[in-house]
């Protein structure tokens, strides 16, 4: 006869085994779900790297966050390459430089026809997924890049640009940015024309980066649902780049989607407060170093830590908190992913695209339904693309 102690040990081991199996089962389910889903990130800043001589998308790089091998490891099968330009670059130079960025994405798809498909429509993204190719789309980050010309905007759309962020970090001549001093009280009449033109072209109106008033002006004018391509929740972190609950609700009420940004200084309130404290010194140093690059950002951050003390630590679970906050507010149909990979500092545990399966597993463990997780991972963005195309077709018929 077994002693009481032996029986207890046996029962304990059986229970632990049960837990382990449940745990393994969830992990396996998450993996299967993640790697069978459309995982479409609406804001990735890898485009300048594509333009670097000798930099290959097909190599796994020790730095940065996104390349083909790491996308495959992380199950990231779709992305909007940001056609990014500092808001201070304006006029013909902004147009010329934009064309070069766009050309780099076209070249990537042309060079890797079996791996990358340049996508313009919802149907294209679905086809790329069926063919197991990366769906490459383009989002233009900053209304300054159209050089105040609707004709130029139309040409960008012809080249495959699928969203226009109305402003970047500074005001344009027709719209206020969230990180500049308000000048136009939102959108000017021309700014409203830009929104109407985007609607006609079937190009998404992106309200990440814009001032709150610009958001509400765009929302009032746009006849199609809009996107926040890379913004998080201001209720959790008071950064002006994030959206208030009221804005998230208004965006969703018109069918739009908020794509959660992962940048550590956006998603964490203590780090945001720290960034306010270090802002002036860090700006001055960045200028000395020749302007923003991810490498310069790392260097400046290290120097600020020496001067002001270490920055508060932020871990990847904060991303889940923002997703969950937005889902609780407006439901899983209106939330997605817009990492800002290669655009700044990521939280610990989310250094690059290989880490993405964690998000799926965390949402599953939180009790999210598989169909809702698929929506957040990419299906909402595909639906939004389709709705905006349909709205544009309707406008063309009128
Ligand atoms: Zn941005």
Image (cartoon, grey):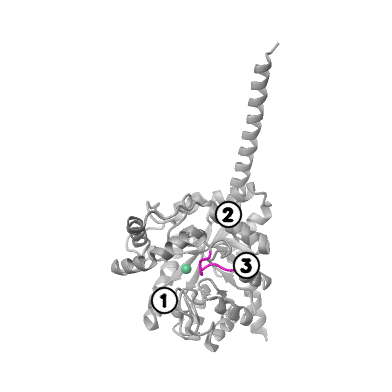
Count the marks: 3
243 in the magenta segment: yes
- Looking at the image, do the residues carrying marks 1 and 2 touch, with CB atoms under 8 Å apart? no
Badge 1 local density, few (<14 within 10 Å), some, or many (20+)? some
The residue labelled by disc 1 is 87
Q: Which numbered tag is attached to residue 372? A: none
User: Residue 354 placed where, x, y %?
Assistant: 48, 50
Badge 2 element: helix
For marks 3 and 2 on the same chain, the one whose residue lies earlier in the sequence: 3
Which residue in the structure is indicated by mark 2? 320
The quarter of the displayed image where residue 251 is located: bottom right
3 or 1: tag closer to the N-terminus: 1
User: Which image quadrant for residue 323?
Assistant: bottom right
Quadrant showing the C terminus: bottom right
Give the magenta-colored segment's residue range.
Answer: 238-245
Of residues 165 and 173, the one drawn nearer to the viewer in this rendering:
173
Q: Is residue 213 magenta?
A: no
Q: Residue at x 45, y 56 (%)?
A: 346
- Answer above or below: position of 189 versus 319: below
Asked whether residue 366 is in view, the answer is yes
Q: Quadrant of residue 162?
A: bottom right
Give the side of residue 56 with respect to residue 128, left or right.
left
Q: Nearer the viewer, mark 1 or mark 2?
A: 2
| Mark 3 burial class by Cα count in 10 Å: few <14, some 14-19, many 20+ | some
Residue at which label 3 appears:
245
Secondary structure type for disc 1: loop
Left or right side of 119 for 1: right
């Amino acid at each position: 006869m077994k002693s009481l102690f032996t029986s207890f040990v046996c029962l304990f081991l059986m229970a632990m085994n049960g837990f382990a199996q449940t745990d393994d089962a969830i992990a396996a389910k998450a993996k299967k779900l993640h790697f069978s889903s459309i995982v479409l990130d609406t804001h990735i800043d890898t485009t300048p790297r594509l333009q670097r001589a000798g930099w290959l998308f097909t190599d796994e790089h020790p730095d940065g966050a996104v390349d083909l091998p790491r996308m495959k490891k992380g199950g990231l099968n779709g992305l909007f390459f940001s056609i990014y330009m500092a808001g201070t670059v304006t006029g013909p130079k902004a147009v010329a430089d934009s064309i070069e960025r766009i050309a780099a994405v076209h070249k990537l798809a042309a060079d890797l026809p079996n791996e990358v498909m340049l996508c313009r429509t919802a149907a294209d993204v679905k086809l790329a997924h069926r063919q197991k190719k990366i769906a490459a789309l383009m989002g233009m980050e900053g209304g300054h890049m159209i050089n105040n010309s609707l004709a130029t905007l139309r040409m960008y759309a012809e080249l495959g640009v699928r969203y226009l962020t109305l402003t970047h970090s500074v005001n344009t001549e027709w719209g206020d940015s969230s990180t500049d001093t308000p000048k136009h009280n939102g959108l000017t009449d021309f700014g409203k024309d830009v929104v109407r033109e985007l609607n006609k072209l079937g190009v998404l109106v992106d309200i990440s980066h814009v001032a709150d008033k610009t958001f509400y002006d765009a929302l009032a004018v746009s006849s199609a649902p809009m996107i926040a391509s890379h913004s998080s929740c201001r209720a959790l972190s008071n950064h002006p780049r994030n959206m208030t609950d009221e804005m998230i609700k208004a965006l969703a009420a018109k069918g739009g989607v908020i794509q959660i940004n992962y940048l550590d200084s956006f998603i964490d309130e203590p780090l945001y407060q720290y960034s306010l404290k270090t802002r002036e010194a860090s700006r001055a140093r960045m200028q000395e170093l020749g302007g923003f690059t991810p490498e310069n950002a790392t260097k400046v951050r290290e120097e600020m830590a020496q001067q002001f003390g270490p920055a508060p630590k932020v871990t990847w679970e904060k991303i889940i908190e923002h997703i969950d906050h937005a889902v609780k507010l407006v439901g899983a149909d209106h939330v997605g992913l817009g990492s800002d990979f290669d655009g700044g500092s990521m939280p610990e545990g989310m250094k690059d695209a290989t880490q993405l399966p964690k998000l799926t597993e965390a949402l599953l463990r939180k009790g999210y339904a598989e169909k809702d997780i698929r929506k957040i991972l990419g299906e909402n963005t595909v639906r939004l693309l389709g709705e905006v195309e349909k709205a544009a077709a309707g406008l063309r018929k009128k």
